[in-house]
């Protein structure tokens, strides 16, 4: 009946993997599956052998395949949005941009954004500026 314990451990490890997606516990879950099957086929197998099988399979898979799988799964910490389309475009200053007083707004495609000057210069209302980057909800602009 030790196979049921290994099955429960496997399910718990799969739940952990699904909630973290770090490609760590999946290898131990596979080791749990292998150990579950072996302990079901050989119910008299000593617990220390079951633990050894679990550790060898899990660590072996982790060391041999994790780097290979990571190559195929490309992760970026940045979330790409359509905001990048604004970078390099022109905008009209709606409210004087003054970094020292924390004021400034520009209008792009009919939408008003908070704005700051990239090099701390004051930019008057009505001037045309270039959008250099977007930080949070503010456009960083220059003349």
Image (cartoon, rainbow, N blue to C red):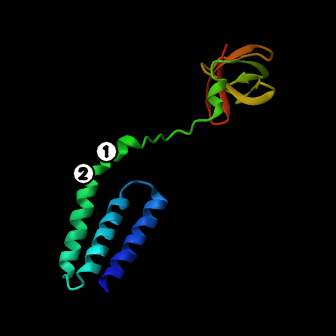
Label 1: which residue?
68
Quarter in which the C terminus is drawn = top right
Q: In this view, does 5 lie above or below 97?
A: below
Q: What residue do we see at 36% from left, 61% from top?
A: 25
Please tell me which residue is depicted at 42% across the width and 71% down the height of the picture: 11
* Cβ–Cβ under 8 Å for marks 1 and 2: yes
Counting every numbered tag in the picture gives: 2
Q: Label for residue 98?
A: none
Query: Looking at the picture, does residue 98 appear above or below residue 77?
Result: above
Q: In which quarter of the image is residue 103?
A: top right
Q: Where is residue 107 in the image (x, y as percent from the top left)?
A: 78, 24
Q: Position of residue 70 (x, y in %)?
A: 36, 45
In the visual, does 6 lie left or right of 47?
A: right
Q: On residue 64, which mark appears?
A: 2
Distance from disc 1 to disc 2, alpha carbons, whole Å, reads 8 Å
Q: Is residue 85 left or right of residue 3?
A: right
């Amino acid at each position: 009946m030790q196979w049921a314990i290994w099955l429960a451990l496997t399910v718990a490890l799969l739940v952990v993997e699904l909630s973290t997606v770090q490609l760590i516990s999946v290898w131990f879950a596979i080791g749990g599956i292998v150990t579950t099957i072996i302990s079901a086929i050989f119910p008299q197998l000593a617990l220390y052998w079951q633990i050894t099988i679990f550790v060898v399979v899990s660590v072996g898979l982790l060391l041999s395949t994790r780097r290979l799988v990571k190559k195929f799964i490309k992760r970026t910490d940045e979330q790409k949005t359509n905001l990048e389309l604004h970078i390099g475009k022109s905008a009209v200053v709606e409210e004087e941009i003054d970094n020292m007083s924390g004021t400034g707004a520009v209008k792009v495609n009919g939408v008003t954004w908070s704005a700051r000057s990239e090099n701390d210069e004051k930019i008057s209302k009505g001037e045309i500026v270039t959008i250099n980057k977007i930080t949070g909800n503010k456009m960083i602009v220059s003349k």
